[in-house]
Image: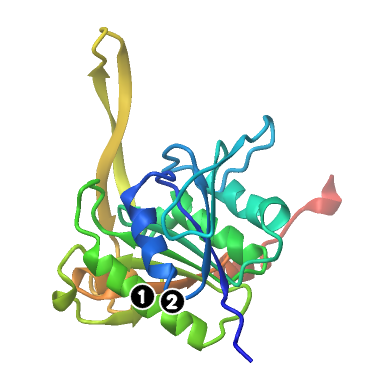
């Protein structure tokens, strides 16, 4: 008896017309039946936002390589919820988010719509991968990322991951032959030194534009995603939604609290 092809939900935060999602669907089609549910416009930096104070409009779209495809006015996390609870007849076997134009390593994962969609998949019991290329230019080559995606999807399906597994994958912006391999690692510690630039629109209106420079706090640590990318490896970080700081929890549990004196 033929094994049923896996149902693969593909989404992103760059929008349904982005080159990255087209490339990911092209790869995913070799492994199963693909359904695309993606925002109708870019949603970068939306994090794990969901739509609760307005309606969501859904539009069927033609998408080469996909069995079904929809654009929606919601967020990346909305797209995954719509897939599981409304648009699909069965729960997807895996969820793929990307290929994102821009890195989502270290602290960036907090803000990322790409990774929030993948994490939403894991929260809904769908093993998920978010894939990002460390270059945010629209016309950058996606060939190396496609080859990495193929390796990852094949490995993912072969190893039968837990339903709540979510992998944050970042691909260095180099040719595939220059990539040294995969590194399973932890999220590196770093932060942005941010500031706002004063700018002016074409019609003379003034506005502020957030910009900044990322700083790696662990340059000598070799087990982080930051080190892996700087040394031409693909970084693969398992992430989850538990934001408890366990070391700090132990510390605050030793605090003396004057509750009874009130």
Label placed on residue 150: 1
Seen from this angle, which residue lies furthest bottom?
1
Q: Residues within 10 Å of mark 1 (few under 14, many from 20)?
A: some
Q: Position of residue 49 (x, y in %)?
A: 58, 43
Q: Tell me the quarter of the image containing the N terminus.
A: bottom right
Label placed on residue 9: none
**How many marks do you count on the picture?**
2
Q: Nearer the viewer, residue 30 or 111?
A: 30
Q: Position of residue 137 (x, y in %)?
A: 22, 47
Q: Tell me the quarter of the image containing the C terminus.
A: top right
Q: Position of residue 108 (x, y in %)?
A: 39, 54
Q: Nearer the viewer, residue 190 or 84?
A: 84
Q: Residues within 10 Å of mark 2 (few under 14, many from 20)?
A: some
Q: Are marks 1 and 2 in contact (CB under 8 Å)?
A: yes
Q: Nearer the viewer, residue 234 or 231?
A: 234
Residue under label 2: 153
Q: How is the image coloured?
A: rainbow
From this viewpoint, is residue 185 visible?
A: no
Q: Secondary structure at mark 1?
A: helix
Q: Position of residue 251 (x, y in %)?
A: 60, 67
Specify whether 174 is left or right of 206. Answer: left
Residue shown at the point (51%, 88%) measured from the top left: 159
Q: Quadrant of residue 226?
A: bottom left
Q: Is residue 90 above or below residue 138?
A: below
Residue shown at the point (26%, 58%) measured from the top left: 134
Q: Secondary structure at mark 2?
A: helix
Q: Quadrant of residue 147?
A: bottom left
Seen from this angle, which residue lies furthest top?
204
């Amino acid at each position: 008896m033929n094994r049923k092809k896996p149902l693969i939900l593909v989404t992103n935060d760059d929008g349904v017309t982005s080159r990255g999602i087209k490339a990911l669907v092209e790869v995913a089609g070799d492994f199963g039946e693909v359904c695309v549910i993606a925002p109708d416009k870019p949603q970068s930096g939306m994090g794990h936002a969901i739509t609760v104070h307005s309606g969501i409009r859904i539009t069927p779209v033609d998408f080469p390589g996909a069995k079904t495809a929809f654009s929606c006015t919601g967020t990346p996390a909305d797209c995954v919820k719509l897939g599981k609870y409304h648009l699909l007849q069965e729960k997807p076997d895996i969820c793929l988010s990307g290929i994102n134009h821009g890195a989502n390593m270290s602290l960036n994962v907090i803000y990322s719509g790409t990774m929030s969609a993948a994490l939403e998949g894991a929260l809904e019991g769908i093993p998920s991968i978010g894939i990002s290329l460390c270059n945010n230019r629209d016309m950058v080559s996606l060939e190396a990322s496609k080859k990495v995606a193929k390796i990852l999807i094949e490995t993912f399906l072969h190893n039968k991951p837990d339903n709540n597994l979510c992998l944050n994958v970042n691909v260095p912006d180099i040719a595939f032959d220059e990539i040294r391999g995969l590194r399973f690692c932890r999220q590196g510690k770093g932060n942005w030194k941010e500031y706002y630039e004063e700018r002016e629109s074409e019609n003379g209106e003034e506005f502020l534009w957030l910009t900044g420079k990322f700083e790696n706090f662990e340059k000598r640590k070799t087990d982080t995603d930051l080190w892996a990318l700087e040394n031409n490896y693909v970084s693969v970080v398992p992430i989850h939604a538990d934001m408890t700081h366990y070391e700090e929890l132990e510390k605050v549990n030793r605090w003396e609290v004057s509750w009874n004196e009130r």
